[in-house]
Amino acid sequence: MNDASEEPVRTLIPVPANERPRRTRRTARVLLLDEQDRVLLFTDTDPGMADSRWWITPGGGIEDGESEQVAAVREVAEETGLQLRDDQLFGPLMVRHVVHGYTDVVIDQHDTFFFARVPQFEISTAGHTQEERITMVSWSWWSEQELRQTAEIVWPIGLLELLQEIARFEVAADRSAYPVDYGSVEESTVPGVL
């Protein structure tokens, strides 16, 4: 995520829908897969909505002058403590436009997804921003079966299909079709598209 001074911490008081500011940003997100093909996900919350919770992949905003790949490596290091080598990061695998509507802001976001296969490791949240310390409260390695069976909200929408895309990417002789464009979606606690 961007420096806390650049990303204001979401307030605990909901903002009326017509008064929520809109922000635009580009992000790099990473699917981290361990030796058992489990994917690392963090919980995220909307502080303005009691008991809100969903699961997300590591990743965040691309800073000025950064490439998507550099941002992906930096975000993984900040959010998990893992320092990826360049040869561990693959992709981009998928791009999409997403609208995130929260109680106090609407974010129009362009996501670029990468993936990396890594040994399971001890997560460190020492690099989390002030906002991440408030909103990202836990993490877990999820198997495909657990993702199929869960009633929990998991973003990105279509994560299971994206995990299958990794298998196709890894065996593809020609990767010119990548990144796959997953179009536009909305993932919101409070609808962002009125």
Image (tube, rainbow, N blue to C red):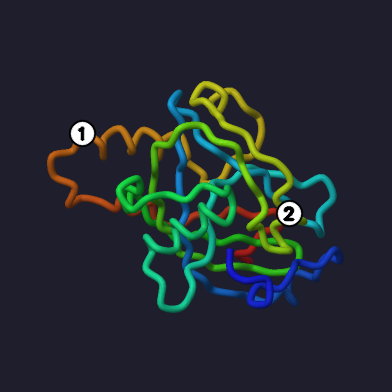
Relative vertical location of residue 136 with respect to residue 130 in this rendering, above or below: above
Q: Residue 135 carries which label?
A: 2
Q: Give the residue type at disc 1.
A: Val
Mark 2 burial class by Cα count in 10 Å: few <14, some 14-19, many 20+: some
Indicate the quadrant where residue 108 lies. bottom right
> Percent from the top left, x then y, of residue 152?
66, 34
Relative vertical location of residue 67 with respect to residue 87 in this rendering, above or below: below
Q: Using residue 181 as the reference point, say whether residue 79 is left or right of it.
A: right
Q: Using residue 17 as the reference point, say whether residue 194 is left or right of it.
A: left
Q: Using residue 3 as the reference point, say whether residue 137 is left or right of it.
A: right
Q: Tell me what residue is drawn at x 80 percent, y 70 percent.
A: 15
Relative vertical location of residue 26 with respect to residue 33 in this rendering, above or below: below
Mark 1 highlights which residue? 171
Mark 1 burial class by Cα count in 10 Å: few <14, some 14-19, many 20+: few
Relative vertical location of residue 48 with respect to residue 115 in this rendering, above or below: below
Label 2 with label 1: CB-CB less than 8 Å? no
> Percent from the top left, x then y, of residue 78?
57, 57
Q: Tell me what residue is drawn at x 77 percent, y 56 percent.
A: 134
